[in-house]
Amino acid sequence: MEHHIKFPRPFIHRHPPVRNTNELFEEKKTLSVRMADSFSAIVGSWKFILIQTGILALWVILNVTAWIYHWDPYPFILMNLVLSLQAAYATPIIMMSQNRLADRDRIEAHNDYLLNVKSEEEVRAILEHLDAQNRALAEIHEILTAKKSID
């Protein structure tokens, strides 16, 4: 009685190595992108908020108390103009940075999907090998049991 134990062919990796999406994105950064990111990081910090609050409080105090010449008397129209200009420029710059981050998130999500597909392929190959080993062990057990009963 001849037995042939069959195993699947070895798994062949058919995919490029996984790359860090942060490194990929850093490679593509232009000067304007770096400037927008830096601006967003500064404007979006507590330090900026506290400094701006201090400046605005000082502005109001100096113009209300008249310690110095009233360059912007109440209702602080010049201050409103300055803040409007700041918002008019800050918003699009921050949006540029946010759009770039959204692009990076999309690339990262796609990279995660590709990694999951690769992982699924490899898990499937491992399960096929385990199943083949189970069949081989069952066949070996059968051979040993049949040999033992003959002896």
Image (cartoon, rainbow, N blue to C red):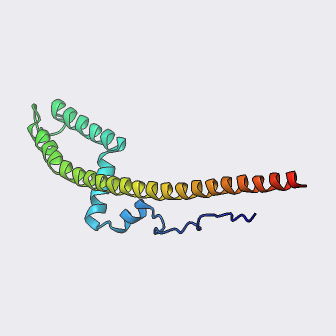
Residue 71 appears in the rendering: no
Image-based side of 60 in relation to 149, left or right: left
Q: Residue at x 20, y 49 (%)?
A: 90
Image-based side of 10 in relation to 51, left or right: right
Q: Give the quarter of the image for residue 74.
A: top left
The percent coordinates of residue 133 (x first, y second) are 67, 56
Give the camera-side residue of 65 and 60: 60
Give the camera-side residue of 75 and 39: 39
Residue 19 appears in the rendering: yes
Image-based side of 52 in relation to 149, left or right: left
Q: Residue at x 19, y 48 (%)?
A: 91
Query: Number of labelled discs?
Result: 0
Q: Residue at x 41, y 58 (%)?
A: 114
Image-based side of 47 in relation to 77, left or right: right
Give the camera-side residue of 10 and 47: 10
98 relative to 65, above or below: below
The percent coordinates of residue 70 (x first, y second) are 12, 38
Q: Give the quarter of the image for residue 31.
A: bottom left
The percent coordinates of residue 113 (x first, y second) are 40, 54
Give the camera-side residue of 93 and 104: 104
The single residue placed furthest to the right in the displayed view is: 151
25 relative to 72, above or below: below
The percent coordinates of residue 50 (x first, y second) are 33, 39
84 relative to 65, above or below: below
